[in-house]
Image: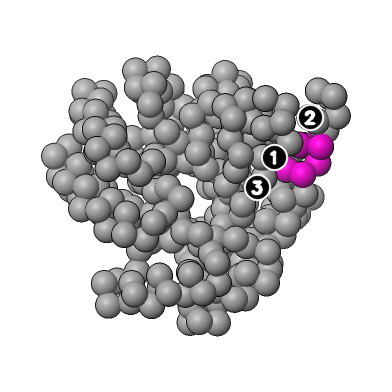
Amino acid sequence: MGEVKRRMKLIVFRHLWGVIGEWEDLFPKFKRAGYQGIESQMPPPEDRKRFRALLRKHSLEFIPQVFSRGKTVADHLESLLEQVNTAKTFSPRFINAHSGQDAFSEDQSIRFFEGALQLEAKDGVAIAHETHRGRILFNPWSTSRLLTRFPDLKLCCDFSHWVCVCERLIEDQIGIIRQCADRCLHVHARVGYEQGPQVPDPRAPEYQRHLEAHETWWRLVWEAQAKRGFRVSTLTPEFGPPDYLHTLPYTRVPVSNLEEICDWQAQRQAENFARHRTKKRQTSA
């Protein structure tokens, strides 16, 4: 196990949410900045060949995002199946899913994940279901119950949503965060605060305690992944554009630079990961 821990590395992905520009310019730019993959919605059919070619050209991995839709559980599962079938053609590391809806009853949520896990087992591509507002996994407590019921359920952990939903930093739910860490495939390294899923600028001193709380939770993920034998951990600094990013009234000028924030977070968490893994190796030596 110690040898596995020494080999675990972090791959940082760059999202395309709110990014302006041509892929031909953006992909090499992201590669130079140290990103090793792209996470985004799948491109429209007419652009998919070009998108795949650019991923290969710049040696970038891909995490496609899919979004189940519809009014019923059957609708959501049907749309999930359709999107997963398309996502597989990109040879993804895994698929990130916004799954179901928050209005589902417990029984509907159970039926959705029964179907989703059957789909995953059949297709052989791992699906990470995101802890996201508006979706089934929008709060810690229902997520915990579903994780207990479904031992094979995997997560993309975006704890910023839960901080917003719960209107507090969720240190009092550390047991559930540990439970999630044991199932986590992927981290969205955005920082939430009590009144929203994204602080205006994570570098600002007034949000230091929010940043450090999230970093504590991400370290729990890394520790759990190391214990599970992961050789690779993945992370996306998923800060979003307006209206996630705060703007000034009337002018709608963003209060901070989205590209700078994403790059700063990517670099900071790469350093935190390296420092944390080094400390763990020294402790176990």
- Alpha carbon of mark 3 to alpha carbon of mark 2: how far? 15 Å
Q: Write down the residue under mark 1.
A: 7
Query: Helix, strand or loop at disc 1?
Result: helix
- Alpha carbon of mark 1 to alpha carbon of mark 3: how far? 10 Å
Residue at 62% across, 75% down: 29
Q: Earlier in the sequence, mark 3 or mark 2?
A: 3
Rendering quarter of residue 168: top right
Which quarter of the figure is the C terminus placed in?
A: top right
Residue at 27% across, 77% down: 46
Q: Main secondary structure of the magenta part?
A: helix
Kind of residue at badge 3: Leu
Tag count: 3
Residue at 35% across, 44% down: 125
> Which one is nearer the viewer's eye here, 74 or 204?
74
Residue at 58% across, 35% down: 230
Q: Earlier in the sequence, mark 2 or mark 1?
A: 1
Question: Is residue 153 rendered magenta in the image?
Answer: no
Residue depth check, mark 1 versus mark 3: number of the one nearer the observer: 1
Kind of residue at badge 1: Arg
Rendering quarter of residue 148: top left
Q: Write down the residue under mark 2.
A: 280
Residue depth check, mark 2 versus mark 1: number of the one nearer the observer: 1
Q: Position of residue 84 (x, y in %)?
A: 28, 51
Q: Could you tell whether 36 is left or right of 130 in the image? A: right
Which quarter of the figure is the N terminus placed in?
A: top right
Q: Position of residue 111 (x, y in %)?
A: 20, 28
Magenta range: 273-278
Q: Write down the residue under mark 3.
A: 10
Q: Position of residue 109 (x, y in %)?
A: 26, 29
